[in-house]
Image (tube, rainbow, N blue to C red):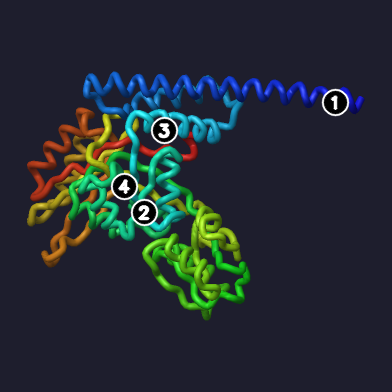
């Protein structure tokens, strides 16, 4: 009986090896097909990325799966395959707020996969500058958090740099308190980016009331500091633990579950419609009563869903503001196009920041 069971295991393992060999063969064939498509697109001078085609692939696979293979895992596996094949047509260098193992780095890997080349930048300003000057093809920047709201340094950069939004990704954030020893008693200072410190303020107040906090440029910088100083604790990502060889003191110290940060992918040119898109604008209002209401009326009349509106002061112009608007739809959609034409004639300043595929929510996986 035992021998029969062992032989059965060996037989099934042989089947798995055969299936793995077939998967590898198919992956290599798919990669060659992607390279051929890239060559044909070069001849026709067409864009390498077709968001509608990619969404159709995902939709077809999820439908044919019939809920047998876990949806999230299926989407993740094919995302890596599709991204790797697309990047074989043209390599992508992605700037992010560094150093390595920040949440921006994690968001980049989630969006572009492991085949892209990642370039660490010291500030969000630097990420924008890298893209604007063409030193990297893309950048990835945090724009808002579900708990703490907008990341103002990112919004302000859109007022300074000429880039376009190419995509978005949402990353569920789980904060870990880490240090070199893993002993909470060794921590005399807690370092992190200002947003994670704010997202964990209640936990820190209850458990480390006498320990000061130190805001730094990024969670990666905090992890580096903790790796070099046994008395510094950091609030950092799971990737930082491995990268900087740190020990976990406490996992999941965020004050609220479901903490999610939205990141934007910036580049030189927005993609074509995917069928489920978002459009972002930067506008200035005329100096007259009811100016904002006029803008909102245009959106209502064109049946445009306004997903977000945020104001930011114009540097050097006291009490003057620009507004960031996120709308559901693509600039090539008729109603979005009409609405933007009306807004451009109505506003003192109008800039289209980009139209791009809307990130999937967990429910879509």
| Left or right placement of residue 154 versus residue 213 in this view | left
Indicate the secondary structure of the residue bearing disc 2. strand
Q: Is residue 146 above or below residue 316?
A: above
Q: Position of residue 256 (x, y in %)?
A: 51, 58
CA separation in Å, label 3 and label 1:
41 Å
**Mark 4 or mark 1, which has the lower sequence index?**
1
* Residue 56 placement: quadrant: top left
Res 122 quadrant in image: bottom left
Q: CA distance from mark 4 to mark 3?
A: 16 Å
CB atoms of marks 4 and 1 within 8 Å = no
Disc number placed over residue 5 in the picture, else none: 1
Residue pointed to by mark 4: 139
Side of 177 where 159 appears, left or right: left
- Left or right, 291 with respect to 171, comes to left
Give percent across and percent down for residue 51.
34, 29
Which residue occupies the extreme bottom position in the image? 210
* Circle on res. 120: 2
Q: Residue at coordinates 21% horizontally, 48% vertically from top-left? A: 132
SS category of the residue bearing label 1: helix
SS type, badge 4: strand
The residue indicated by pointer 3 is 83
CA separation in Å, label 4 and label 1: 53 Å
Mark closest to the chain's N terminus, 2 or 1: 1
Task: Tell me the CA gap for discs 2 and 3.
Answer: 21 Å
Q: Are marks 2 and 4 in contact (CB under 8 Å)?
A: no
Q: Nearer the viewer, residue 21 or 67?
A: 21
Please identify the quadrant where the N terminus is shown. Answer: top right
Instruction: Please name which of the two marks, 2 or 4, marks the residue nearer to the observer.
Output: 2
């Amino acid at each position: 009986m035992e021998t029969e069971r062992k032989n059965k295991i060996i037989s099934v393992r042989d089947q798995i090896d055969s299936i793995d060999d077939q998967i590898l063969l198919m992956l290599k064939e798919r990669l060659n097909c992607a390279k051929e498509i890239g060559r044909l697109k070069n001849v026709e001078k067409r864009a390498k990325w077709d968001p509608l085609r990619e969404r159709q692939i995902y939709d077809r696979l999820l439908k044919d799966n019939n809920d047998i293979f876990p949806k999230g895992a299926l989407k993740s596996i094919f995302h890596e395959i599709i991204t790797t094949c697309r990047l074989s047509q043209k390599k992508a260098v992605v700037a992010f707020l560094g150093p390595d193992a920040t949440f921006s780095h994690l968001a980049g890997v989630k969006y572009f996969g492991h085949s892209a080349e990642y370039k660490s930048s010291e500030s969000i300003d630097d990420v924008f500058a890298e893209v604007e000057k063409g030193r990297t093809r893309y950048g990835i920047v945090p724009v808002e958090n579900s708990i703490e709201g907008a990341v103002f340094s990112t919004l302000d950069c859109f007022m300074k740099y000429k880039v376009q939004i190419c995509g978005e990704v949402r990353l569920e954030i789980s904060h870990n308190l880490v240090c070199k020893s893993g002993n909470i008693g060794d921590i005399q200072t807690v370092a992190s980016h200002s947003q994670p410190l704010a997202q964990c303020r209640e936990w820190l107040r209850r458990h480390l009331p006498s320990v000061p906090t130190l805001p730094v440029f990024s969670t990666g910088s905090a992890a580096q500091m903790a790796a070099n100083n046994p008395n510094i604790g950091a609030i950092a990502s799971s990737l930082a633990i491995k990268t900087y060889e740190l020990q976990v003191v406490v996992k999941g110290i965020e004050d609220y579950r479901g903490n999610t940060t939205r990141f934007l992918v910036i580049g030189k040119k927005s993609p074509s419609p995917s069928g489920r898109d978002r459009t972002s604008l930067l506008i200035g209002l005329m100096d007259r009563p009811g100016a904002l209401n006029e803008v909102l009326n245009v959106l209502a009349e064109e049946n445009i869903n306004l997903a977000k509106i945020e104001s930011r002061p114009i540097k050097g112009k006291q009490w003057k503001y620009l507004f960031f608007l996120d709308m559901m739809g693509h600039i090539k959609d008729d109603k979005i196009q009409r609405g933007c034409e009306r807004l451009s004639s109505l506003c003192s300043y109008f800039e289209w920041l980009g139209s791009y595929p809307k990130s999937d929510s967990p429910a879509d996986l």
